[in-house]
Amino acid sequence: MESVRAVLIDIDGVLTVSWQPLPGAVEALREIREAGLVVALVTNTTSRTRASIAATLADAGFPVTAEDILTAPAVTAAYLAEHWPGARCALLNSGDIREDLDLEGVTVLDADDTDSVPDVVVVGGAGPEFDYAALDRAFGQVQRGARLVAMHRNLYWRTDAGLRLDSGAFLVGLEQAARVEAEVTGKPSAAFFAAALAHLGVGAQDAVMVGDDIESDVLAAQRAGVTGVLVKTGKYLPQTHEAASGTPDHVIESFADLPALLGLAQQEL
């Protein structure tokens, strides 16, 4: 295990589906940690705070704490604090993430404040909140000069009931209608992977990224210099794999196979 020092791991579709552990995932993560590798769980999940995610995973047996988790909302909050300090933000998101935003001092307008024009419109994960009125309001705010920031561009994710539409599908419409391009802070942005590596204190050459999304997880990590490992669980689809814009460094059946890959293919990594 000389070259790989860190493992970046997507959560939804890799470790869990609908927050239920996938077979062998808990044991594999324990084995990786016992081998002395540092770990970051990197996720575009926008429905929960880091603390909530950590508690759910720990209850399921995963050896993780909130410090091990890097979410799109947390990275977005840091991005807003750095680039738009003091900005008033309108948040379009399904789920309560204000705790992570508050940690960086981000000012979020109340959802019922339809009169104020925000400085930034922040788009998170999709859900019932993404109705016509909310999307039209965001469209109007961007037309009036608000910057458009998106936590991710995911088109869909997998639940125990199947694939579900995500905010990336709506984001494309907002961009086209308003004739702007969103600033993306979560995966697949290079800034997200840079933040994860900095969090762990390792270089890209010392890390692997494990994900079920070939574009946003694996190929995006590879463009950042991180070795990419695609798992055939979660949102993985053979046709998406075949039509992808690049080739993963490694493909395994599930996260349960990662310890063997790290041990048997260490020289290749």
Image (tube, rainbow, N blue to C red):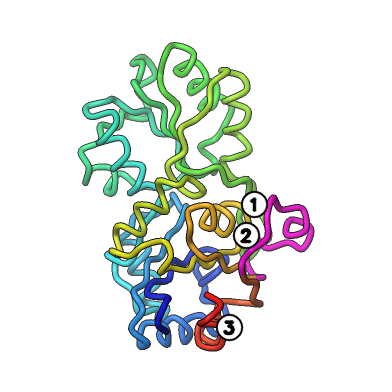
Write down the residue under mark 3: 257
Give the camera-side residue of 57 and 145.
145
Is 239 one of the magenta-colored residues? yes
Query: Considering the numbered disc 3 on the image, is that residue within a helix, a strand or a loop?
Result: helix
Which badge, 1 or 3, comes first in the chain's sequence?
1
Examine the rendering and report whether any part of residue 11 can be seen: no
Write down the residue under mark 1: 164
Is 17 one of the magenta-colored residues? no
Give the camera-side residue of 215 and 169.
215
Residue 239 horizontal side relative to residue 135, left or right: right
**Disc 2 marks which amino acid?**
Arg
Q: Give the range drawn in magenta.
A: 232-249
Counting labels gives 3
Which badge, 3 or 2, comes first in the chain's sequence?
2
Q: Check residue 61 in the rendering and tell me which mark sits there, or answer none.
A: none
Residue 152 percent coordinates (x, y): 50, 44
Residue 239 percent coordinates (x, y): 79, 58
Query: Considering the numbered disc 1 on the image, is that residue within a helix, a strand or a loop?
Result: strand
- Mark 3 surroundings: few (<14), some (14-19) or many (≥20) residues within 10 A: some
Q: Check residue 158 in the rendering and tell me which mark sits there, or answer none.
A: 2
